[in-house]
Image (spheres, rainbow, N blue to C red):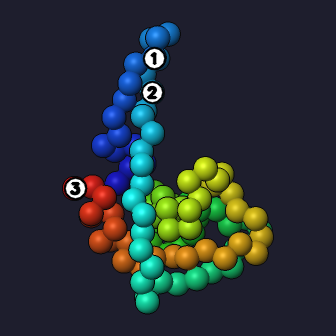
Amino acid sequence: MARYDNNETKKLLDGRVVYRSKIYPAIPLRDDDKYVVTQTGDRLDSLAAQYYNDSTLWWIIASSNNLHTASIGLEDGTVLRIPQNFIEIEKNFNK
């Protein structure tokens, strides 16, 4: 899934077309979740590529860690939850 697939657009008064914000789901805790401590250079997209083989699934890590307004870069030592049921999460989100 590309980052903006299925996103609605809107036309601004100046004629530009922009994507509407997307509200991502809350992702419940599970026993099979992994936890990682970030290091210099870690980003949500690179972690998604590492754990899911798909950098566009960065939003799953962001949503599971309540990082809705955070930048894609992360501070060293941040503990992140990495849900392992990402296929199920993505499938349910795209219904």
Residue at 62 percent across and 80 percent down: it is: 36
Looking at the rendered structure, the secondary structure element under dot 3 is: loop
Looking at the rendered structure, the secondary structure element under dot 1 is: loop
Q: Which mark is residue 12?
A: 1
- Where is 62 relative to 82, above or below? above
Which quadrant would the C terminus be assigned to in this image? bottom left
First along the sequence among labels 3 and 2: 2
* Count of numbered circles in the view: 3
Q: Looking at the picture, how far across and down is residue 51, in whole percent?
A: 49, 75
The residue pinned by badge 2 equals: 18
First along the sequence among labels 1 and 2: 1
Q: Residues within 10 Å of mark 2 (few under 14, many from 20)?
A: few
From the viewer's perspective, tell me whether residue 45 is left or right of residue 16: right
Q: Looking at the picture, how far across and down is residue 75, in whole percent?
A: 76, 65
**Which amino acid is tagged 2?**
Val
Looking at the rendered structure, the secondary structure element under dot 2 is: strand
Q: CA distance from mark 3 to mark 1?
A: 28 Å
Q: Which mark is residue 58?
A: none
The residue pinned by badge 3 equals: 95
Q: Nearer the viewer, residue 58 or 30?
A: 30
Q: CA distance from mark 3 to mark 2?
A: 23 Å
Mark 3 and mark 2 residues within 8 Å of each other at the beta carbon: no
Q: Residues within 10 Å of mark 1 (few under 14, many from 20)?
A: few
- Where is 71 relative to 32, above or below? above
Q: Looking at the picture, how far across and down is residue 16, in whole percent?
A: 46, 17
From the viewer's perspective, tell me whether residue 85 is left or right of residue 51: left
Mark 1 and mark 2 residues within 8 Å of each other at the beta carbon: yes
